[in-house]
């Protein structure tokens, strides 16, 4: 792949091009890196405290759940800069990208609040399968260059 380094005011973006020309980027600014690093370090410290038994009244389920949850949250945080670079490569303006991210945040807030109840009705296994299929369709839609499929992808993902 190819690497191109683009510098801008207050940011340093590294754009990576894979073998199929797919662009990936990692925006590194103090506004994005510092909070994520602090949250990840805090999460890691909590996980260690849970595993070492220093936190009172922590069940074994929580001790097994928290490390996986922190890993998933960290992976989700890392998704933002890559999607920004991908949308930029697709020719989206900053205002369109902001709207796409807003759709994603609103979708997550609304759908996240009903997901638990839905899984209570359809079952955890079916809920997980539904999530996997929606995430799959969301990822497929990121290959579009049109705004509407990108927005639907953010809505589903």
Image: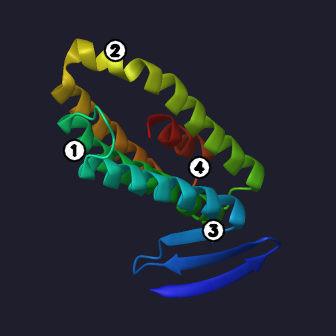
Packing grade of label 3 (10 A; few <14, some 14-19, many >=20) is: some
**Residue 9 vs residue 136, the one in the foreground:** 9
Marks 1 and 3, the one that precedes in the sequence:
3
Q: Is the C-beta separation of discs 1 and 2 under 8 Å? A: no
Residue that badge 3 annotates: 27
Q: CA distance from mark 3 to mark 4?
A: 23 Å
Above/below status of 32 relative to 66? below
The mark lying in front, picked from 2 and 4, is 2
Label number found at residue 146: 4
Residue under pointer 2: 117
* C-alpha separation, residue under disc 1 versus residue under disc 3: 32 Å
Quadrant of residue 30 in the image? bottom right
User: Can the viewer see residue 24 in this picture?
Assistant: yes
- Eyeballing the image, is 1 above or below 142? below
Which residue is depicted at the point 42% across and 44% down? 138
For the question of whether residue 140 can be seen, the reply is: no
- Give percent across and percent down for residue 137: 36, 43
Label drawn at residue 104: none
Measured in 3D between alpha carbons, the distance from the residue under mark 2 to the one under mark 3, in whole angstroms, is 36 Å
- Label 1 belongs to which residue? 64
Q: Quadrant of residue 7?
A: bottom right
Q: Is residue 61 left or right of residue 103?
A: left
Of helix, strand and loop, which one carries label 1? helix
First in sequence: mark 2 vs mark 4: 2
Task: Work out how far the residue at label 1 is from the one at label 4, CA to CA, in angstroms.
Answer: 41 Å
Q: Nearer the viewer, mark 3 or mark 4?
A: 3
Looking at marks 1 and 2 on the same chain, the residue that comes earlier in the sequence is marked by: 1
Reply above or below: 140 against 61: below
């Amino acid at each position: 792949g190819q690497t191109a380094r683009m510098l801008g005011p207050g940011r340093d973006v590294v754009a990576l091009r894979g073998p199929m020309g797919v662009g990936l980027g990692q925006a590194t600014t103090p506004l994005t890196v510092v909070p994520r690093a602090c949250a990840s370090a805090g999460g890691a410290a909590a996980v260690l405290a849970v595993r070492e038994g220093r936190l009172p009244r922590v069940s074994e389920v929580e001790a097994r759940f928290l490390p996986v949850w922190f890993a998933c949250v960290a992976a989700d945080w890392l998704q933002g800069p890559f999607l920004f670079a991908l949308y930029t490569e697709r020719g989206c303006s900053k205002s369109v990208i902001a709207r796409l991210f807003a759709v994603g945040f609103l979708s997550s807030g609304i759908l996240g609040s009903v997901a638990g109840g839905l899984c209570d009705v359809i079952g955890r296994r079916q809920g997980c399968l539904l999530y996997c299929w929606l995430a799959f369709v969301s990822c497929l839609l990121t290959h579009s260059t049109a705004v509407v499929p990108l927005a639907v992808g953010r809505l589903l993902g």
